[in-house]
């Protein structure tokens, strides 16, 4: 569960987040909003990369304000980035192992199993030894998700994981995201401009507009909200949750 209380972030005269208070309890939560709405800033606050000017955040009851990023990772916060962090000269397996090296396991067998299981979960077992430079856009995004599932995550934050994917690739990504809560016993916080992906994955969705909460609720209800459509979506009357 994510709890945000009176959160504000200020960069000079700009407030990308302004007095945000929200509680997010569902297994997969979506976050949408126009460019500049404060979406990535919010992820950076949760990750520990940005210090708020006011307010606090909690995950599973743990106060994170003031906790450095590396300790948040140890606590169980994981994230992907809009620009993937895949090392070009390492194999897919080695890229995931680089994360596992920072997690304590009882034996090498447990360590190796965790790496292989995460890669298999995202559907890339057939690409174990492929170099990062030879991975497709879809494979790079899925590899990032595999890295985020190493250890015992409590919250997995996905920043536009569907960018650049085809329709068939997005369908596979959708299934992977849907399965994360059962696989990792972790909550998922998904940012994406692909409203189809949001509607197919997310139990509830929040909408930010100029750093303020515009809407929060069951995803289909939010996407049909006239205020949300005016601010961001246009008309999506035909959307249905899968």
Image (spheres, rainbow, N blue to C red):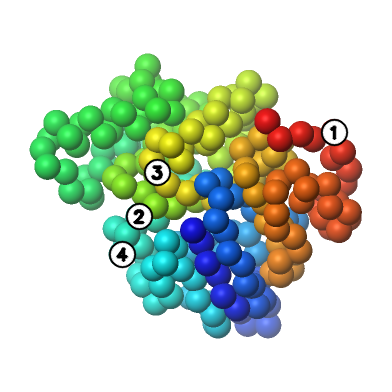
Dot 1: within a 10 Å radius of its alpha carbon, few (fewer than 14), some, or many (20 or more) residues?
few
Q: Which is in the foreground here, disc 3 or disc 4?
A: 3
Q: Secondary structure at mark 1?
A: loop
Q: Give the spatial CA distance, label 3 vs label 4.
A: 20 Å
Give residue 157's position: percent from left, percent from top. 50, 51
Q: Give the spatial CA distance, label 2 vs label 4.
A: 9 Å
Give residue 179's position: percent from left, percent from top. 48, 33
Q: Which is in the foreground here, disc 2 or disc 4?
A: 2
Give residue 214's position: percent from left, percent from top. 76, 63
The numbered mark at residue 185 is: 3
- Confirm or deny contact between disc 1 and disc 2 (CB under 8 A): no
Identify the image quadrant of residue 119.
Answer: top left
Q: Secondary structure at mark 3?
A: loop
Residue in view at x 49 percent, y 58 percent: 1
Query: Which of 115 and 1 lies nearest the eye of the viewer?
Result: 1
Q: Which residue is mark 2?
A: 76
Q: Give the spatial CA distance, label 4 vs label 1.
A: 43 Å
Mark 2 / mark 3, whichever is N-terminal? 2
Dot 2: within a 10 Å radius of its alpha carbon, few (fewer than 14), some, or many (20 or more) residues?
some
Q: Which is in the foreground here, disc 4 or disc 1?
A: 1
Mark 1 / mark 3, whichever is N-terminal? 3
**Up/down of 102 relative to 161, above or below:** below
Query: Which of 49 and 58 lies nearest the eye of the viewer?
Result: 58
- Confirm or deny contact between disc 3 and disc 4 (CB under 8 A): no
């Amino acid at each position: 569960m994510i709890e945000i209380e009176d959160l504000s972030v200020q960069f000079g005269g700009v407030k990308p987040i302004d007095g945000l208070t929200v509680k997010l309890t569902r297994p997969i939560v979506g976050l949408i909003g126009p460019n500049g709405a404060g979406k990535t800033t919010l992820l950076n606050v949760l990750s520990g990369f940005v210090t708020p000017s006011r307010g606090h955040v909690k995950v599973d009851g743990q106060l994170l304000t003031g906790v450095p990023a590396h300790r948040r990772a140890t606590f169980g916060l994981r994230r992907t980035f809009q620009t993937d962090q895949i090392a070009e000269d390492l194999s897919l397996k080695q890229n995931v192992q680089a994360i596992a090296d920072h997690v304590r396991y009882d034996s090498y067998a447990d360590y190796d199993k965790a790496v292989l299981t995460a890669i298999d979960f995202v559907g890339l077992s057939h690409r174990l030894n492929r170099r990062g430079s030879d991975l497709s856009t879809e494979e790079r995004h899925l590899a990032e998700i595999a890295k985020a599932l190493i250890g015992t995550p409590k919250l997995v934050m996905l920043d536009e994981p569907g960018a650049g994917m085809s329709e068939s690739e997005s369908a596979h990504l959708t299934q992977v995201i849907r399965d994360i809560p059962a696989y990792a016993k972790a909550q998922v916080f998904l940012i994406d401009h692909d409203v189809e992906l949001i509607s197919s994955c997310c139990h509830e969705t929040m909408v930010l507009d100029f750093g303020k909460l515009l809407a929060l609720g069951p995803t289909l209800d939010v996407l049909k909200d006239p205020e949300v459509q005016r601010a961001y979506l246009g008309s999506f009357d035909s959307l249905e949750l899968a």
